[in-house]
Amino acid sequence: MSQVIVGVDPHKKSVTIEAVNEHGQVLATGRFGTDSTGCRLMIKYVHKQWPHRRWAVEGAHGVGRPLAQRLLAQGEAVVDVPAKLAARVRVFDTGNARKTDATDAHAVAMVALRTPRLNQLAFDEELIALRLLTDRRDELSHRRVQTVNRLQRLLTELIPGGAKRDLSALQAKRLLATMKPRTLVGKTMRRMATEEIEDLIAVDTKLKAIKNELRSAVVVRGSHLMDLHGIGPAGAARILSDVGDVARFPDRNHFASWTGTAPLDASGGDQIRHRLSRAGNRRMNHVLHIAAIVQIRHDTEGRAYYRRKLAESKTPMEALRCLKRRLSDAVYRQLVADAHADETIAEQTDPGGQSGATPQSSAADLHTPDIGSSDKPQPGPAPPTLPRSRPNSTPRGLDSQPTTTTRRSRQGAAPRRTNDLDGDKPRRTLPRRRDRRS
């Protein structure tokens, strides 16, 4: 029996589905609630109608995450459909930009039917818990920044010139102890600053505890990402939770495109250039950016590589982007090496001390014998598609006689222009018509 694709357009309060067969024929549509009763009715309806099925959820890492996790917990096969891809299919299928829940569900189902390389989701409790801890750590980090900003504003009004930029809770507490305001405004600001310091101490305590928990979770996971200089427990946990299964990336170039570190080809005509990519997973891009900054600030191979790029007349930002691309390759190799270690396959150790950084570390890149780090692999210029004007002409060497066009050019007349597309008869130029009249 053929497999049925169930396209899902999730929302906060409702879910719209559409079931299609392998030929793209619509079998059924429906709308259900997102509460427990609605999800139970939807799953029961689909189970009764189609025993062989596959769910396609739009934005399974965003608004569709709760529904996708419920389906995975019940053993369902779920794929993630990117919202941008579904939007393109919707426009091509309908011919307009009208957007409804029904058309969205249909577009999601068509994408899952025609795109074989969608991300297959898996129910991994360790990764889910790691993602929750990482999100919690990011929220606490943002809260700490806000607390420090409020404290800095209060200290600027209490102390002439304010306090230094990187202020810890202990330093702020010692600094505030020296302040003895006598006015009502000063006493109020001092009390507010004391409360902010208490909040800062509480946030720092929570951040320290969650950092230790993340470190333990990453080690238990069997990952060696923290061996890379500049990647700590929070960065390693973010990489593991967002990447999931590294086998979904065919090679390091696809991984770099996903992280937003691969430059985009913006060549035109004879000009070959590349521009910065604003796409990709921005959280992963931020992790690689922090790792690159840390390596530049310390005596590491990353700093030496960065300085070599500066010596090649690259700007500081261009050199930083090259380093981020290099770090993306290193992270990919480490993920592949960890995956191989989980499968009990012996891995070689790089002389630099990074486990798994071997020249042939990609199981999915078997067609490429060497996938070592590259500065920034870029596509070359597009091959010519137009035929030459004279395909049968023999190329002129250094000792051959000049052609008629060359003689005319030496005499001061403009050369003839030929049509390179269809080989029409050459047209005479304006200077020759003036010579004829004279």
Image (tube, rainbow, N blue to C red):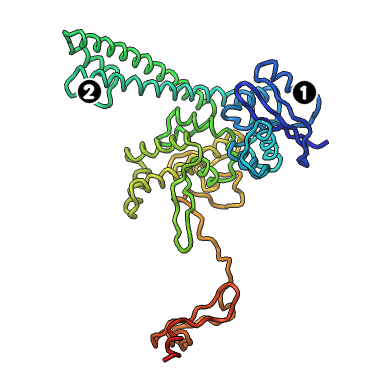
Q: Which residue is mark 2?
A: 163
Q: Position of residue 263 (x, y in %)?
A: 47, 48
Figure quadrant of residue 116: top right
Q: How many marks?
A: 2
Task: Inspect this view and state whether residue 115 appears.
Answer: no
Q: Is residue 138 left or right of residue 12?
A: left
> Which amino acid type is marked by label 2?
Ala
Camera-nearest residue between 128 and 302 = 128
Identity of the residue drawn at 80% across and 37% down: 2
Q: Position of residue 125 (x, y in %)?
A: 60, 23
Figure quadrant of residue 285: top left
Identity of the residue drawn at 53% across and 37% down: 335
Q: Nearer the viewer, mark 1 or mark 2?
A: 1
Q: Is residue 419 above or below residue 24?
A: below
> Which amino acid type is marked by label 1?
Tyr
Q: Position of residue 40 (x, y in %)?
A: 72, 18
Task: Inspect this view and state whether residue 358 appears.
Answer: yes
Q: CA distance from mark 1 to mark 2?
A: 64 Å
Q: Which mark is residue 45?
A: 1
Q: Is residue 328 above or below residue 404?
A: above
Q: Position of residue 260 (x, y in %)?
A: 48, 42
